[in-house]
Image (cartoon, helix red, strand yellow):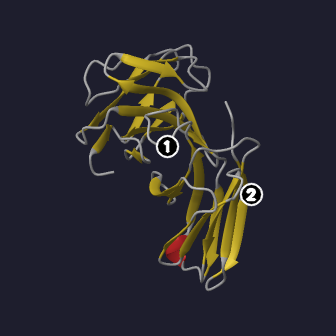
Amino acid sequence: GQQVMQIPQYQHVQEGEDFTTYCNSSTTLSNIQWYKQRPGGHPVFLIQLVKSGEVKKQKRLTFQFGEAKKNSSLHITATQTTDVGTYFCARSPDSGGYQKVTFGTGTKLQVIP
Amino acid sequence: DGGITQSPKYLFRKEGQNVTLSCEQNLNHDAMYWYRQDPGQGLRLIYYSQIVNDFQKGDIAEGYSVSREKKESFPLTVTSAQKNPTAFYLCASSIGRGVFFGPGTRLTVL
């Protein structure tokens, strides 16, 4: 199936530093979803972006969807130890349907106190 | 995640045995999914179902089977044909905007 690639695979940051993970696709995306998985836990849905150039914020998290709808980013400002986990992007063929949802490879974030 | 239950949390089986993982949701979601996650790896789609009595293969369906006889239930059978069944299995459901996961079952085949 069509994949989305995420970079970096791992990231270690000092607490208080910023963090960004990128999601890239070779084809145009109808939407991009972001999830967070804490160590030992299950993925939790964070947000879905649909519009070209869309930017959404959730407290210290900023999500962007590229103008060409082929890439997306998640930026965390001033990381905290509670941000530790793996962040996944995901795609589905259509924004509103119950379609096949394909996940990216994930970025594992470690925050050093 | 509160509306999706998977049991048990840990499951051990001998090689060559079929095993069925349960997944129940009370969210009234039409779509349900099964994903597999290996240590340090991403999520790979096994099967998904958009409505009752219908399901489609995902990217790694070989060695697995599912049924969707009720909207609330989407059990996954890991058959003896699955070559590397030890993994973390995640069930999920969706109403079309985001996928919501259960707590998962860690299957170990000895």
Q: Residue at x 25, y 42 (%)?
A: B27
Residue A82 in the image: state x and y as whole percent. 49, 74
Under circle 1, the secondary element is loop
Marks 1 and 2 sit apart, C-alpha to C-alpha, by 24 Å
Subunit under mark 1: A
Badge 1 amino acid: Ser
Q: Nearer the viewer, residue B17 or A39?
A: A39
Image: B28 above or below A70: above
Write down the residue under mark 1: A95
Residue B95 in the image: state x and y as whole percent. 35, 41
- Residue A19, by quadrant, is bottom right
Image: B60 above or below A78: above
Q: Is residue A74 visible?
A: yes
Residue B92 in the image: state x and y as whole percent. 40, 39
- Residue A51, by quadrant, is bottom right
Q: Residue at x 74, y 57 (%)?
A: A7
Residue B108 in the image: state x and y as whole percent. 50, 33
Subunit under mark 2: A
Write down the residue under mark 2: A7
* Disc nearer the start of the sequence (1/2): 2
Q: Nearer the viewer, residue B99 or A65?
A: A65
Q: Residues within 10 Å of mark 2 (few under 14, many from 20)?
A: some
